Image (cartoon, rainbow, N blue to C red):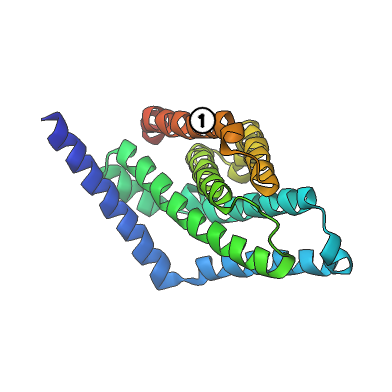
Amino acid sequence: MQNDHFIMRAREIRSFVVQDILIEWRLRYAINGILLYLACIIFICYLSFRTQMNTMNPVTWNTLFWIIILFTAVNAVTKSFIQISEERLLYLYTIADPAVVILAKITYNSLLLISISLIGFLFYSFILGNPVADQGLFLINLILGAIGFSSVLTMNSGIASKASNSTSLMAILSFPVILPLLLVVIKISKNALEGLDRSVSFNQIVFLISINVIVITMSYILFPYIWRS
């Protein structure tokens, strides 16, 4: 029975994720706007650093990249609940388990941000060069970081949607979790840039995975209480 329940939940989550993908594909202006925003920021960075392109500090390259990804994540994920109409929220409330809703939103936003981050990394590397020595570690870190940003911002978007000043509240709620997450991904990326042995980054990777698991678990447990309010 437990396995059947798990399979049913998984199918429901998949159904909501597919629905969000289809809606995004039909509208397309949102994802196009995010990609345009990402391209503009990277191009502005190129214009700012083009006089020292050949000697750009890898630390600057790394920090700048993650700041770009963070702000792109905020723009991409903020709309999870805040921009959903009251009618659609009421419809979801009547047909869906809140735990399924939050897991589906986290899954969709994670897939979205992973895709955007990979595109951003390719474009960023093409424009500003790619000093990364360990590409595999960097990409693993990029995927885990995208999942972490998506999980935190999705949950906080759900909380903030219940308040009147939702955008400001989301920023306040996200900062305490996003900051250590950002520091960890920058540290792992720095190790990847320097080509250090992967064992050096093992503790940071475990910490990053732990943050993701904790945030997703807390979302699964707490969101139903927020949803009912």
Count of residue discs? 1
Q: Position of residue 120 (x, y in %)?
A: 60, 62
Q: Residue at x 75, y 54 (%)?
A: 61
Q: Residue at x 30, y 52 (%)?
A: 16
146 to the left or right of 11 = right
User: Which amino acid type is marked by label 1?
Assistant: Val
Where residue 216 appears, x then y in whole percent?
Answer: 43, 34
Q: Depth check: give the residue in front, 26 or 189.
A: 189
Left or right: residue 97 compared with residue 131: left
Q: Which residue corresponds to mark 1?
A: 206
Q: Is residue 91 visible?
A: yes
The location of residue 149, given as percent across then percent down, is: 55, 43
Q: Can residue 95 be seen in this snapshot?
A: no
Relative vertical location of residue 132 with respect to residue 154 in this rendering, above or below: below
Give coordinates of residue 225: x percent, y percent. Answer: 38, 28
Quadrant hosting residue 17 = bottom left
